Amino acid sequence: MRIDFDPETMGPVPFYKLLTSTIVPRPIAWVSTVSGDGAANLAPHSFFTVAAVDPPIVQFTSVGRKDSLRNVEDTGEFVVNLAPEALFEQVNATATNFPHGVSEFEAVGVAQEPSARVKPPRVAGSPVALECVVHGTLGLGNSTVVLGRVVHAVVDDEVMVDGHAEISRLRPLSRLGKNEWGTVGDVRDLARIRYEDWEGRGLEQA
Ligand SMILES: Cc1cc2nc3c(=O)[nH]c(=O)nc-3n(C[C@H](O)[C@H](O)[C@H](O)COP(=O)(O)O)c2cc1C
C-alpha cells in the first residue's frame, strides 16, 4: 500500500518537510560570501548540486532572502566549501540567523584563508573549495536558485589518492530530514555496464 500526498491540499510547509525527508541524503554547500562593504558570511545550503559540466557550473538555492543570496547579488561571487564531518558543530552553528553584517567566521570561530580568484574567503579547515562567479539566478516562488561558474578549485593533498579525492578522507556531512545529518557509510564500487556487454545479464525483478 502507498500513501498519497497532494501538495495543493497539504500546503507548502508540510510538503517541504516531505520533500526534505525523502530527497536524501543531500550534500551540503558551505557557502562563503562577502557583503558589498566587505563583511564575510558563511552558511550551509543543502539544496545544492552540480548544474553543468562544460562550463563547470554548480547551484545552490536560497529559500527566502538570506544574507548569502543578498551578498551574491551584490558582489557576484561565492565559494562552496565542502562541509566536513570534523567541523560538524561549526557547520550547524553557521546556520544561526545572525544579523546582516555579523561574520559567522568570527561569531562561530571558523578559520578562514584567502581565495585565489574571488573575494569571499575559503574555510581553511575544509578539504575542498570551489571558487565561483555568478552565472545567473532563477527566481522560483519564494526561492532563488543561484548558478555559479567554478573559476578555481582547491583540494587538500591529504585527501587525494592517485589523483582522486578519496571519500574516506573527505568525510563530507550530508543533510537528511528534520534535524538529521548523515555521515559517509558503506561505500560500494560497481562499474556501469556497456550495452555491448548486456546480453544475458538481465537482472531479476525484486
Ligand atoms: C544543514 C543545513 C542545510 C541548510 N540548507 C539550506 C538551503 O539549502 N537553503 C536555505 O535557504 N537555507 C538552508 N539552511 C538554513 C540556512 O543555513 C540558514 O537560514 C542561515 O542562517 C542562512 O544564513 P545567511 O542569512 O547568512 O545566508 C540550511 C541549514 C542547515 C543547518
Image (tube, rainbow, N blue to C red):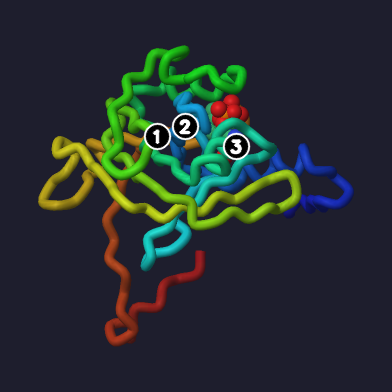
Q: Is mark 3 within 8 Å of ligand 1?
A: yes
Q: In this picture, is 6 found above or below 156?
A: below
Residue occupying image coordinates x 69% and y 42% = 18
**Numbered disc 3: secondary structure:** helix
Which residue has dot 3 on it?
70
Residue type pointed to by label 2: Val
Give the crowd class for mark 1: few <14, some 14-19, many >=20 residues within 10 Å: many
Q: Is residue 146 left or right of residue 119?
A: right
Which residue has dot 1 on it?
120
- Say whether marks 2 and 3 touch (CB < 8 Å): no
Q: In this picture, is 12 found above or below 30?
A: below
Which residue has dot 2 on it?
34
Q: In this picture, is 167 found above or below 206?
A: above
Front residue of 39 and 113: 39
Give the crowd class for mark 2: few <14, some 14-19, many >=20 residues within 10 Å: many
Residue type pointed to by label 1: Pro
Q: Where is residue 122 shown, x and y percent of the image? A: 33, 32
Tally of marks: 3
State which quadrant residue 158 falls in: top left
Nearer-N-terminus badge (2/1): 2
Estimate the spatial distance between the alpha carbons at disc 2 and disc 3, rounded to whole Å: 9 Å
Front residue of 175 and 140: 140
Q: Where is residue 44 shown, x and y percent of the image? A: 50, 32
Estimate the spatial distance between the alpha carbons at disc 2 and disc 1, rounded to whole Å: 5 Å
Residue type pointed to by label 3: Arg
State which quadrant residue 178 falls in: top right
Q: Where is residue 189 shown, x and y percent of the image? A: 27, 56
Residue occupying image coordinates x 47% and y 24% = 39
- Say whether marks 2 and 1 touch (CB < 8 Å): yes
In what quadrant does ligand 1 lie?
Answer: top right
